[in-house]
Image (cartoon, rainbow, N blue to C red):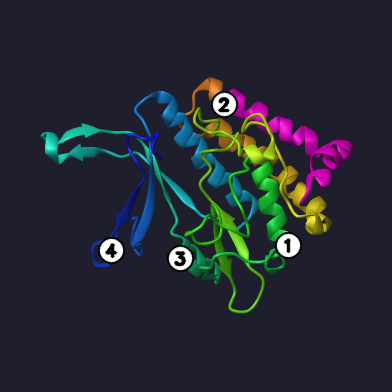
Amino acid sequence: LNECKFPPLRLNFRRGTLLGSPFEGQNKLKLVTQCRRQSKYRDYLALEYTIYRIFNLISEKSLRVRWLDIVYRDSAKKNREASPPGFLIEDVGRAAQRLGLQELKTDSLKAQSLDSTHATQVALFNYFLGNTDFSPIAAAAGEDCCHNQALLAPADGLHYTIPYDFDRTGWVNAPYATPNPRFRIRSVRQRLYRGRCVNNKHLDASLQLFREHRDEIDALVKEQPGLTPATRRYLLKYSNAFFRIIDNPRKIDRAIVRNCI
């Protein structure tokens, strides 16, 4: 991102050098860094980390993450040190291996190709986050499908999309995050459901999944290091607003069912 003074990094390990280390068996990992020095950017980093952890609760078909305390040494400036935190994201290919699936590369696909149960969980998860910066079936020109979602599939069967890259969500609420104007919403904090109407038969089960994990979601927010008290209050309030909707049948119909596509 142009907004970042310290961009994300890709760690490329030599396999034979990692025996006995926490990185044994790894090759390439994305390191999400603290974008700028200000303390609020540590908040944004921790907020995005909690998102991955929450989706780990909702679905095993998700990317695992690991929080790191890091010391950087600048070899060009007499090894001057800095110690902003970061987190690692599981490589998509490794996640595919773990799940017994294959990573796919394509320009686009049909909605009917997706596993409808998982697609509903992903759509509802993005609604929970206040996220409209994704597509489960298409990507920008020149990019692999799908936008901010990795595509995995068994050798013969329906496909799964795994969401990633959440800095433009209402959950993170970064100052540079703006909603896509075609959705006609005022800010990223405003939730908009973008699930498929044909999959509404899976809504009840998916909503119940979120209800069952509510206490664990709240615990992740309360226990995550690096968040200011004000940010914790914001997250709990934002999360509670979601649960007030899904605990009310009339609000479910108005906010979710009627907004499916």
Circle 1: is it few (<14), some (14-19), or many (20+) Cα within 10 Å? many
Residue at image mark 2:
232
> Dots 4 and 1: beta carbons under 8 Å?
no
- Is tag 2's residue or tag 3's residue first in the polypeptide sequence? 3
Residue 116's tag is: 1
| Residue 122 picture location, percent across and down | 66, 52
Q: Residue at x 68, y 40 (%)?
A: 183
| Residue 202 picture location, percent across and down | 79, 57
Kindly report which numbered mark, 1 or 2, lies closer to the viewer in this rendering: 1
Judge whether residue 95 can be spotted in this image.
yes
Kindly report which numbered mark, 2 or 4, lies closer to the viewer in this rendering: 2
- Is tag 1's residue or tag 2's residue first in the polypeptide sequence? 1
In the image, residue 236 lies in the stretch drawn in magenta: yes
**Would you place residue 120 above or below residue 132 in this image?**
below
Q: Residue at x 35, y 41 (%)?
A: 7
Q: CA distance from mark 4 to mark 1?
A: 40 Å
- Name the image quarter holding residue 113: bottom right
Circle 4: is it few (<14), some (14-19), or many (20+) Cα within 10 Å? few
Circle 2: is it few (<14), some (14-19), or many (20+) Cα within 10 Å? some
Specify the amino acid type for callout 2.
Arg
Specify the amino acid type for callout 1.
Ser
Residue at image mark 3:
93
Q: Main secondary structure of the magenta part?
A: helix
Judge whether residue 61 can be spotted in this image.
no
Question: Which residues make up the magenta segment?
Answer: 233-261
- Residue 42 as seen in the image, left or right of residue 258: left
Q: CA distance from mark 2 to mark 4?
A: 38 Å
- Name the image quarter holding residue 259: top right
* Callout 4 secondary element: loop
Q: CA distance from mark 3 to mark 4?
A: 20 Å
Specify the amino acid type for callout 3.
Gly
- Is tag 4's residue or tag 1's residue first in the polypeptide sequence? 4
